[in-house]
Image: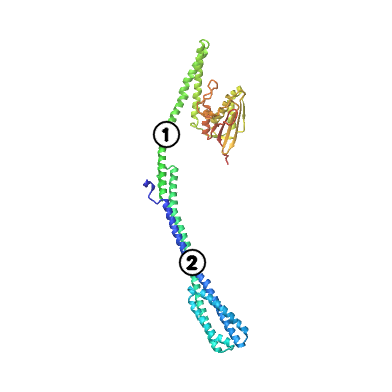
């Protein structure tokens, strides 16, 4: 059994291996893509959510401090209190900006916190040493001292802006790098997936499609008649097992074919012996039967009334038996020759064949007062003599097995696809449905021979002739009163 199954991997193992490889590759691609996407998201968050807002808040802080310095200077120079509003609003904006910068300057922006501390120290020093005293005394005080202190504030702001600009540039660089990495990862993943698909396609081709195609080609050769050619399989274990099963079937077919050939030879020998019997029956048996019938008829003519009544009856039985034997032998010979003594099949008018059959039955038709109706019948391909025998048997039976009324027989045909269906219907005594098949068996009679003459071969010969011409014949048991036989013949293809 193991040898028959083959040594290759089974398809299930191939399938699991392919699925495992696909899962690993897809998992690696997903992980790499997730890493690249995460890096890109972090870089974008640094620039968009931290650096850019910090730069805006630094600008707000710078504007607030300038507004404070402007308000102080205006108040001490003019003494107008409305100049204190920019100073006060500037302090509020400064406080909000400093708090926002403290919240943003975490992680990668922690280094900018020192610059913010410098700005606050310089601003506090400017306020404590110049702005607050100037506001309390309502005079400009040491203007140069105030200008020098605020210049320190400006310097600290410039340093802070420089640090934020540097952080922005670094963030942009990281963002660009992460974007490039994401693109590269996407391209790599697409290439790897395409390569995986190509590899899987090659594996499927060489592991499944090619072995199956090879097996199909070998099976096709065997189906074409090369039964001695062994069938070998390769590839997965199931395909090798299937090839072994097919080869076993081939060997079984070879054995059956040898038996069939022997039977065919026996059948040919039997047919030759049957032909020899037919020859003997048609020549050697016919002559003794003719002599018996002739001498019995001579006895009947010469000694009719000279012997007793029983002797006349015996002579009549002998003459009738000899004649019946002659008819039976002739019918049997005709039945055995159907399909063996083949002649060229011609396209004939079945209507003319049916008319000829009716003409052959002219005596019986006239005696019974039968009415034969022949509808339009199509041309068919066949042997005219055999087809005439079919029509003659069917019409003759309809005339013979009539009831109290004179026989009424109708012949018609209609097309059904590639076949013509012929119908022969009569108003006779009919046939029970239980005998629908028995009537086509040779020598099977439904009535005693003294009631209706005949040998019981007619319908059997009709079936043999119709099947020889590629059709079939049957008794229609649903037709109602009387008897209805139907048979089919192939439609003759019209020549272009």
The C terminus lies in which quarter of the figure? top right
Tell which circle, 1 or 2, labels the residue nearer the N-terminal end: 2
Q: Nearer the viewer, residue 439 or 221?
A: 439
The span from disc 1 to disc 2 (Cα, nearest Å) is 82 Å
Q: Say if mark 1 contacts mark 2, CB within 8 Å.
A: no
Q: Nearer the viewer, residue 370 or 69?
A: 69
Observer-side mark, 1 or 2, equals: 2
Residue 21 visible in image = yes
Task: Tell me the number on the disc at residue 340.
Answer: none
Q: Is residue 300 left or right of residue 248?
A: right
From the top left corner, tell me how far across and down residue 271 is, in percent.
44, 30
Q: Of helix, strand and loop, which one carries label 1?
A: helix
Residue denoted by label 1:
263
Residue denoted by label 2:
38
Q: Of helix, strand and loop, which one carries label 2?
A: helix
Q: Is residue 324 above or below residue 72?
A: above
From the top left corner, tell me how far across and down residue 37 is, in percent.
49, 66
Q: Nearer the viewer, residue 62 or 202?
A: 62
Residue found at x 43% / y 32%:
267
Few, some or many residues within 10 Å of mark 1 (<14, 14–19, 20+): few
Residue 63 visible in image = no
Few, some or many residues within 10 Å of mark 2 (<14, 14–19, 20+): some
Q: Is residue 337 above or below residue 107?
A: above
The N terminus lies in which quarter of the figure? top left
From the top left corner, tell me how far across and down residue 365 is, in percent.
60, 24
From the top left corner, tell me how far across and down residue 64 is, in percent.
57, 80
Q: Nearer the viewer, residue 426 or 343?
A: 426
Q: Give the farthest residue toward the front.
A: 136
């Amino acid at each position: 059994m193991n040898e028959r199954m083959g040594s290759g991997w089974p398809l299930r193992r191939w399938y699991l291996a392919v699925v495992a490889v696909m899962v690993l590759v897809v998992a690696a691609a997903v992980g790499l893509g997730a890493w690249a996407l995460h890096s890109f998201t972090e870089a974008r968050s640094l620039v968009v959510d931290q650096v850019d807002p910090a730069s805006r808040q630094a600008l707000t802080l710078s504007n607030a401090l300038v507004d404070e310095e402007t308000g102080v200077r205006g108040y001490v120079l003019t003494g107008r209190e409305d100049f204190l509003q920019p100073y006060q609003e500037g302090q509020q904006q400064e406080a909000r900006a400093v708090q926002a910068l403290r919240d943003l300057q975490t992680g990668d922006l922690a280094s900018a916190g020192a610059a913010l501390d410098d700005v606050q120290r310089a601003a506090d020093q400017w306020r404590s040493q110049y702005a607050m005293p100037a506001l309390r005394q309502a005079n400009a005080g040491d203007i140069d001292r105030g200008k020098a202190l605020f210049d320190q504030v400006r310097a600290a702001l410039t340093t802070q802006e420089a640090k934020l600009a540097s952080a922005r540039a670094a963030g942009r660089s990281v963002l660009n790098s992460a974007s490039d990495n994401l693109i590269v990862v996407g391209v790599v993943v697409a290439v790897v997936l395409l390569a995986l698909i190509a590899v899987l396609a090659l594996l499927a081709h060489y592991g499944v499609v090619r072995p199956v195609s090879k097996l199909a080609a070998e099976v096709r050769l065997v189906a074409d008649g090369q039964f001695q050619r062994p069938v070998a399989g390769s590839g997965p274990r199931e395909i090798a097992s299937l090839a072994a099963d097919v080869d076993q079937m081939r060997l079984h077919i070879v054995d059956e074919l040898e038996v069939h050939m022997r039977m065919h030879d026996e059948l040919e020998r039997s047919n030759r012996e049957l032909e020899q019997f037919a020859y003997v029956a048609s020549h050697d048996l016919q002559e003794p039967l003719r002599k018996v019938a002739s001498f019995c008829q001579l006895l009947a003519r010469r000694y009719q009334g000279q012997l007793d009544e029983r002797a006349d009856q015996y002579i009549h039985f002998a003459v009738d038996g000899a004649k019946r034997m002659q008819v039976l032998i002739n019918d049997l010979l005709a039945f055995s020759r159907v399909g063996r003594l083949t002649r060229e099949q011609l396209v004939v008018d079945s209507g003319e064949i049916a008319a000829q059959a009716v003409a052959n039955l002219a005596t019986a038709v006239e005696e019974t007062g039968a009415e034969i109706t022949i509808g339009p019948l199509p041309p068919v391909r066949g042997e005219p003599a055999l087809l005439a025998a079919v029509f003659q048997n069917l019409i003759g039976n309809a005339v013979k097995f009539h009831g109290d009324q004179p026989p009424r027989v109708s012949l018609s045909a209609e097309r059904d696809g590639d076949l013509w269906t012929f119908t022969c219907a009569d108003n006779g005594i009919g046939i029970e449905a239980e005998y629908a098949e028995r009537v086509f068996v040779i020598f099977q009679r439904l009535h005693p021979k003294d009631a209706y003459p005949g040998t019981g071969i007619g319908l059997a010969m009709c079936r043999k002739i119709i099947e020889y011409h590629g059709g079939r014949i049957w008794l229609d048991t649903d037709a109602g009163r009387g008897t209805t036989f139907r048979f089919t013949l192939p439609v003759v293809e019209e020549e272009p």
